[in-house]
């Protein structure tokens, strides 16, 4: 794991702090040095150090333990390593009880100091990430990018090249459910495997730009200082800081609020973030991967998306085509998901599709793309009581070869009334079912897809007995 960070040194011995500061800078750390404790809390609050080396005997009225107590009371988000001069273990034990992360006994050598610092930072970084991951839902099961079509093969080749080159900003476009998140995770893993890192240890933080409430998104992304707003009772790192050394995935960037777009652009350009209420810019070393299912060019034309941000993002962009444009992948994906779900639900006897059902799978248009395919197979596996899934087991929209009222045209799809007429209710019911399916049964999202209110959708679901 790549460990860098901001180290604050407080020791009245000028020689020691100068020597340590130089050694730490050589290791890639940033440092700030103080030889007395005047305004120490204010200074720390202004610089948000990750770690502090704090001498116990400062030659002042207050000693290091008093300062440590003050740091703990102020809930600063800084790890403290005590420098103890005497060889009695007593003060070290007291420091640990108050909340120090570790201690070093003078005289120490530089290697020892660096080792302790790295250990403490690594631990706190992991704790940060665990704290974040506990909150976020992530699909760990699928990091594999399955596909045998030429486009997917080319895409994987490209993704590897872009990742290996260390391109810092990448855009992934494609309809919903085409695998943008899968590709993003794949690139992250590839890059860090190449660099010989243990990918489990490198942060990968996914943020959905639309899932966070407006009043929180900014502090979630950039962090905040204590009392930056009423509820901010302590310093907090933002996701960019948490992703330092790894990757941040910004999902649905196309829906990002305008004021955040400009802040985000600044981060991309300077690779620095400033916490809400903060006074300094903090450097971050992150690969930024943004995804969108919107046509960003169109959004720019509609003045919905900043043009400069669009250019910045689209230098390295990758497009995942819809599944209906790479039907060669359907069989392989189906096989893959059958295997996965028959294992997950311990129904090893469910093998796959009959030839006839597979044909329908290949012909079907998969408006919800790979996600829809995956969901359909999951349902088949759970409900199956035969080895092979036949047409009769498939959901209606796939199994029924009926006169669909749709004619697909690239630019303006249009509904056409079939010769023999159609039941409007059936069309409505069918579209609602598809929307629910595509939205993973999330009714808010499904309602959005149908441009109807949540309440109307609830009513329709009841009316058609869809659940
Ligand atoms: N090539 C693939 N191989 C294996 N699984 C895939 C592939 N593509 C997509 N999936 C699976 O399909 C589902 C949807 O993929 P993903 O979440 O990456 O889509 P997305 O493009 O990010 O969609 P959205 O725009 O709705 O967020 C996931 O469960 C993922 O595991
Ligand atoms: Mg996604």
Image: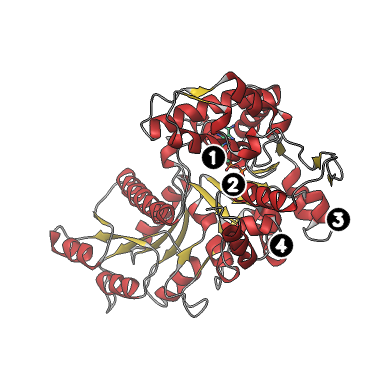
Is residue 19 shown to the viewer in this render? no
Q: Secondary structure at mark 1?
A: helix
First reached walking from the N terminus: tag 1 or tag 3: 3
| Whether residue 444 is situated above or below residue 251 in the rendered picture | below
Mark 1 neighbour class, 10 Å CA radius: few under 14, some 14 to 19, many 20 or more: some
According to the picture, the residue beneath numbered tag 2 turns out to be: 437
| Whether residue 139 is situated above or below residue 341 in the rendered picture | below
- Give the numbered dot on residue 375: 1
According to the picture, the residue beneath numbered tag 3 turns out to be: 301
First reached walking from the N terminus: tag 3 or tag 2: 3
Q: Residue at x 33, y 63 (%)?
A: 13
Q: Residue at x 49, y 66 (%)?
A: 47
According to the picture, the residue beneath numbered tag 4 turns out to be: 262
Do labels 4 and 1 touch, CB within 8 Å?
A: no
Would the CB of label 4 be found within 8 Å of ligand 2?
no
First reached walking from the N terminus: tag 2 or tag 4: 4
Q: Residue furthest top?
A: 355
Mark in the foreground, 2 or 4: 2
First reached walking from the N terminus: tag 4 or tag 1: 4
Q: Secondary structure at mark 2?
A: helix
**Residue placed most toward the observer, 442 or 395:** 395
**Residue placed most toward the observer, 323 or 63:** 323
Mark 4 neighbour class, 10 Å CA radius: few under 14, some 14 to 19, many 20 or more: some
């Amino acid at each position: 794991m790549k460990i860098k960070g901001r180290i604050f040194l407080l020791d009245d011995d000028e020689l020691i702090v100068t020597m340590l500061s130089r050694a730490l800078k050589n290791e890639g750390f940033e440092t700030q040095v103080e030889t007395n404790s005047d305004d120490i809390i204010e200074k720390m609050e202004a610089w948000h150090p990750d770690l502090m080396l704090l001498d116990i005997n400062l030659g002042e009225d207050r000693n290091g333990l008093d300062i440590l107590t003050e740091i703990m009371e102020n809930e600063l988000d800084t790890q403290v390593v005590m420098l103890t001069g005497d060889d009695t273990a007593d003060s070290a034990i007291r420091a640990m009880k108050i909340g120090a992360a570790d201690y070093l006994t003078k005289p120490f050598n530089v290697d020892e100091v660096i080792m302790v610092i790295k250990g403490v930072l690594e631990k706190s970084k992991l704790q940060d990430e665990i704290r974040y991951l506990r909150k976020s839902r992530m699909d760990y099961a699928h990091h594999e990018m399955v596909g045998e079509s030429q486009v997917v093969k080319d895409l994987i080749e490209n993704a590897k090249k872009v990742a290996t080159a260390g391109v810092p900003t990448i855009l992934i476009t494609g309809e919903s459910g085409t695998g943008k998140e899968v590709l993003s995770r794949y690139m992250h893993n590839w890059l860090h495997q190449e660099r010989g890192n243990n990918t489990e240890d490198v942060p990968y933080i996914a943020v959905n730009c639309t899932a966070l409430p407006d009043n929180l998104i900014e502090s979630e992304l950039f962090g905040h200082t204590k009392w930056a707003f009423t509820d901010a009772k302590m310093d907090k790192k933002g996701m960019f800081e948490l992703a330092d050394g790894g990757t941040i995935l910004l999902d649905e960037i196309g829906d990002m609020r305008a004021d955040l777009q400009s802040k985000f652009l600044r981060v991309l350009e300077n690779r620095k973030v400033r916490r809400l209420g903060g006074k300094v810019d903090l450097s971050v070393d992150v690969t930024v991967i943004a995804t969108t299912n919107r046509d960003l060019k169109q959004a720019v034309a509609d003045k919905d998306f900043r043009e400069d941000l669009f250019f910045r993002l689209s230098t390295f962009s990758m497009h995942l085509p819809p599944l209906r444009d790479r039907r060669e992948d359907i069989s392989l994906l189906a096989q893959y998901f059958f295997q996965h779900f028959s294992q997950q639900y311990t129904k090893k006897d469910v093998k796959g599709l009959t030839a006839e059902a597979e044909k329908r799978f290949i012909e079907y248009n998969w408006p919800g793309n790979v996600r829809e395919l995956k969901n359909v197979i999951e349902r088949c596996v759970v409900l199956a009581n035969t080895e092979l899934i036949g047409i009769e087991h498939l959901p209606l929209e796939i199994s029924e070869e009926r006169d669909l009222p749709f004619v697909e045209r690239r630019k303006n799809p249009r509904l056409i009334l079939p010769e023999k007429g159609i039941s409007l209710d059936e069309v409505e019911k069918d579209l609602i079912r598809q929307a629910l399916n595509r939205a993973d049964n999330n009714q808010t999202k499904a309602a959005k897809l149908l441009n109807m209110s949540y309440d109307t959708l609830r009513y329709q679901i009841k009316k058609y007995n869809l659940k």
